[in-house]
């Protein structure tokens, strides 16, 4: 059975929206009602390995809208093929999901940002040195996708409107994707800042590239979990990233709920 056949067999029709949960951003799982879940392995999807990324697909209701949550993602730094990194979002698209919300925990490069801030991603810089689009011409989608609207303009406008209504402060900016798994050096954070980055992380961009090829609208949010290296007097730990993400996750959950419940 193909992944899509398994998705149909287990969950039925595809929901309109899906959300990819980043490091420590499991908040939405608790907000989803009447949920069904299935491990990635049982769905024929590649499995995850990092703490805080459980690796299961959850389908349930958020507000009044049915939604799929990808709890756990594969990162480029695990050394897995890029096709594995983006397999889950490609399968959601093939199943029939029409728009995808991506979330991540990120360090700040913009000195005005503080841990707990939410940043709407307007654009990105890909410093991973790899792309899931490298390969022969695809069977589906465009070989050379336009990236000028990679983060869907209409979804971003809606996100800003909902944030105002919900009184949630929303930053906007450019996300720089690094390969990792080491956090950046202070010199790298200074470089990224000069090149236009506001937030720095190790995910999201591969999925955005894969979905740009397929023409699936995406919107992405970075939860600023820590100051970028050199901006903070203390060393960085994965546990700190997860804790801050969890503490600030509630308001991002409300914002995403409002967004996927509107048109
Ligand atoms: N750098 C890269 N990735 C991250 C960071 C960071 O500071 N915080 C969370 N993910």
Image: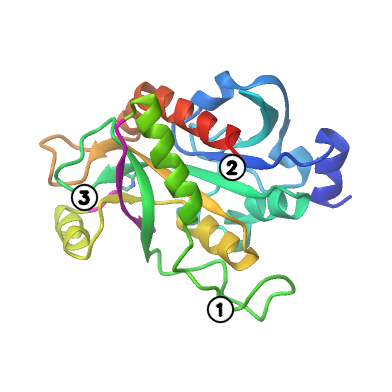
Q: Secondary structure at mark 1?
A: loop
Q: Position of residue 16 (x, y in %)?
A: 69, 42
| Residue 119 image point, x, y percent | 33, 42
Kindly report the distance in space between the C-alpha atoms of the residues bearing marks 3 and 2: 28 Å
- In the picture, the disc for residue 48 is 2
- Which residue lies under the disc numbered 3? 109
Q: What residue is disc 1 on?
A: 144
The answer to whether 60 is drawn above or below residue 171 in the figure is: above
| Left or right of 248, for residue 153 | right
The crowding category of the residue bearing disc 2, from other C-alpha atoms within 10 Å (few below 14, some 14 to 19, many at least 20), is many
Of circles 3 and 2, which is in front? 3
- Could you tell me which secondary element the residue under label 2 belongs to? loop
Query: Residue drawn 57% across and 36% down?
Result: 262
Q: Earlier in the sequence, mark 3 or mark 2?
A: 2
Is disc 3 placed on a helix, strand or loop?
Answer: loop
Question: Magenta segment range?
Answer: 169-184
- For ligand 1, the image quadrant comes to top left
How many badges with numbers are in the image? 3
């Amino acid at each position: 059975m193909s992944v899509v056949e398994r998705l149909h067999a287990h969950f039925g029709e595809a929901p309109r929206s899906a959300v990819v949960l980043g490091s420590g951003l499991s908040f939405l799982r608790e907000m989803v009602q009447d949920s069904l879940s299935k491990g990635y392995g049982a769905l024929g999807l590649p499995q995850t390995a990092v703490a805080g990324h459980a690796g299961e697909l959850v389908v349930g209701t958020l507000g009044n809208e049915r939604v799929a949550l990808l709890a756990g993602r594969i990162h480029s730094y695990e050394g897995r093929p890029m096709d594995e990194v983006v397999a889950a979002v490609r399968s959601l698209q093939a199943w029939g999901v029409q728009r995808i919300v991506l979330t991540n925990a990120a360090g700040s490069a913009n000195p005005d940002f503080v841990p707990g801030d939410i940043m709407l991603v307007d654009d990105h810089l890909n410093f991973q040195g790899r792309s899931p689009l490298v390969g022969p011409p695809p069977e589906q989608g465009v070989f050379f996708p336009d990236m000028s609207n990679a983060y869907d303009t209409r979804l971003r406008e809606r996100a800003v409107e909902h944030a105002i209504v919900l009184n949630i402060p929303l930053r906007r900016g450019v996300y720089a994707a690094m390969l990792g798994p080491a956090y950046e050096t202070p010199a790298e954070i200074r470089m990224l800042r000069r090149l236009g980055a506001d937030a720095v992380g190790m995910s999201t961009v591969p999925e955005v590239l894969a979905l740009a090829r397929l023409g699936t609208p995406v919107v992405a949010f970075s939860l600023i979990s820590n100051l970028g290296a050199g901006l903070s007097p203390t060393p960085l730990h994965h546990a700190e990233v997860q804790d801050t993400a969890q503490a600030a996750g509630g308001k991002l959950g409300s914002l995403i709920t409002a967004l996927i419940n509107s048109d």
